[in-house]
Amino acid sequence: MANPRQPVQRIESLGDLRDRFAASLEYYRCRGGVLFISYCRYWEQHGFVQQSLARFLTENGVRVTWLDAAGWRRYTPTLYWQSELLKVRQIWRLPGERVPPIRYLSVGLQVRDIAREIQALGGNPVVWVQAGLEPGMAERLPYIDVFSTFDDPYRHPADDPLCHKARLIICQNRFTESLLDVIPEDRRVQLLPPVDLRDRNFGSTPFIFPARFPKRVMGYIGSHRSGGFDTFMLEHFIRNLPDWGFLLMGRTDARGMGDVERLKRHPNFLHIPWAKRSELASVWSQIDVSLLLYRNLPSQDGAFPVKLVEGLHFGVPAVGTQVNKTRDITDHFPCSSFADQLVEAAVKTADWPKEKVQRLYDHFRFEMDPRLQLATVTERLK
């Protein structure tokens, strides 16, 4: 198990970051704006990570078009905030793409659709691909400025047309960057995912735990699919710390619900499938340790545990299992695949001094500030 140490001292100040971000805005404006292309429903999930870049841009006078989730079934993304500079819509494609001729025609229609959006933004916007493209898309697009790999690091390997065409590739963790190390360093960069941590995103509605529930609580807040979250490790915690309460809050799949039903037999376990976003601040304020009990999952090997910084925002430290997703936090937080070690570490982590948790928060808040990613991109593209 890695021993937590003090985070490295930041070289840049928040003042430096504000200046860099302000300088980057002129570049985005001169390009006519930013066209994000996302083939997953990132916008619909209302994730801070996926939407924060668009929000910071539009709040500072930059036009943004976000093409979300290609599909043949009609889908209208829900807009959780409004801006005259923001356009969000679905990419439409033909049904029956398993048939090669239809697939080729559908890709062509999508390319034409994207080309029209490029022209609507003046003909030269920053084209920013989120997570990936369907086969045959990259070769037929006029240009691609940025490719953000996101969670699945294997979908587009180094010899993929998308990696060849993108001027800059952003990796969320060191593991993904190691897979792309044959690509020249001036065309790739590791940047932690951008997260909007402004307080207005959390709300202030009170959340009350059930009567007689333990006062000290460990838990996880967020979606927890059965393939990616270790409920057996969580049950080990529940059994070995009967005086602690354990919370699992968020959506899961059918198999995950089966695991939850098994855990409900323990009186010190509470599962909440969904909660209002306005209650998040209240929930986090009552948790002592965030349990990042992830499993090895190829589609998550390129991810970074965003819940880490969300918890730190409310003064909550974390412990986690040792997987590729947590590799970049092992210098700062206890991570282990041995259940007994992790239980012991979690109890100790709950009593970390507030000053230590604050230093960690300052470090990760800076590294995950959306302005840092937006500024770095312009500096690498110029």
Image (spheres, grey):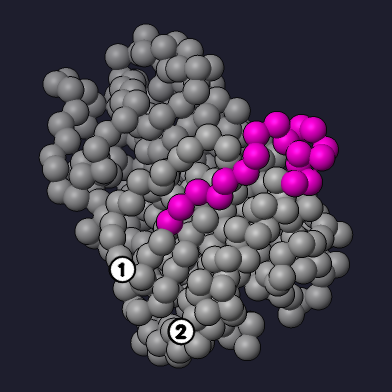
Which residue is painted at 30% across and 14% down in the image? 267
Image quadrant in which you'd find residue 176: bottom right
31 left or right of 151?
left
Image location of residue 155, percent across then percent down: 74, 48
Structural crowding at the residue carrying mark 1, measured as other residues with C-alpha within 10 Å and reported as few (<14), some (14–19) or many (≥20)? few
Q: Position of residue 20 (x, y in %)?
A: 46, 87
**What amino acid is found at the position of numbered circle 1 in the picture?**
Glu
Residue stretch rendered in magenta on the structure: 88-105
Q: Residue at 29%, 40% (x, y): give it.
A: 287
341 or 290: nearer the eye?
290
Query: Vertically, is 45 above or below 256?
Result: below
Question: From the image, which quarter does the N terminus lie in?
Answer: top right
Q: Is residue 235 magenta?
A: no
Q: How far is mark 1 from mark 2, CA to CA? A: 15 Å
Mark 2 Cα within 10 Å, few/some/many (few <14, many 20+)? some
Q: Which mark is residue 84?
A: 1
Q: Quadrant of residue 336?
A: top right
Is 140 displayed left or right of 272 in the figure? right
Reply above or below: 171 against 281: below
Q: Is residue 264 above or below residue 238?
A: above
Q: Which residue is mark 2?
A: 29
For mark 1, give the secondary structure.
loop
* For discs 1 and 2, the disc positioned in front in the rendered view: 1
